[in-house]
Amino acid sequence: MHKLITRRMASSTNGGAAKYPQYLAAVKRLVEQHRKIKDEPLHLAVYFAPKRNPRDVFLFEVIGGFGGEHIDPEKKIFEISFGSTAGFELPPSRHLRLILTNPVEFGEAVRGKWKGVMELKEAKRHGAAQLIFRDAMGREFWELL
């Protein structure tokens, strides 16, 4: 398993710029790769900085069909952590944390105030969330945050 690491975000007038801008281009490239996956369309991608794990880079994505459109019975959004790779170089002890969900689970997570969504909402409220991509459905999701 690969391990990717990236730095976090800080506030700006546009709703959140990277605390670690040297990773923003890599995050955008990764999102572009995810957009090319046709059987699991990307609806929303947000680069954000929650309070936990301040050295890590966080990317939240809502993906059509992800996880079979199931809702986690334990009310936890899927998260995976990666270290450095050739395509996403990071220093030791930094990680890229991908937080992935599907539209059905996202809606349930917002209504149920799941931890994974609440930390994203908090980051957005504090200007520590940068919208990287959204389609028409993603626009609605962004407004729910």
Image (cartoon, rainbow, N blue to C red):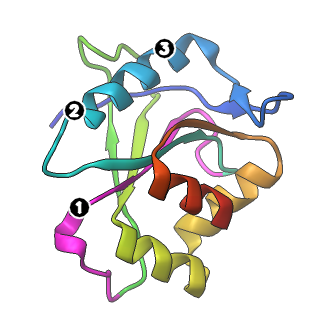
* Quadrant of the frame with the C terminus: bottom right
- Location of mark 3 (residue): 25
Q: Residue 105 or 116: which is nearer the viewer?
A: 105
First along the sequence among labels 2 and 3: 3
- Location of mark 2 (residue): 36
For image coordinates 61% across by 80% down, the residue present is: 113
For image coordinates 65% across by 49% down, the residue present is: 50
For image coordinates 63% across by 19% down, the residue present is: 20
Residue 145 appearing in the image: no
- Location of mark 1 (residue): 66
Percent x, y for residue 8? 62, 31
Residue 129 image-quadrant placement: top right
Q: Amino acid at mark 2?
A: Lys
Percent x, y for residue 77? 40, 68
Q: Is the residue under label 1 in contact with that under label 2 (CB below 8 Å)?
A: no
- Where disc 1 sits, the SS reads helix
- Where disc 3 sits, the SS reads helix
Q: Is residue 127 above or below residue 140?
A: above
Question: Does 60 lie within the magenta span?
Answer: yes
Question: Does 105 lie within the magenta span?
Answer: no
Residue 28 image-quadrant placement: top left
First along the sequence among labels 1 and 3: 3
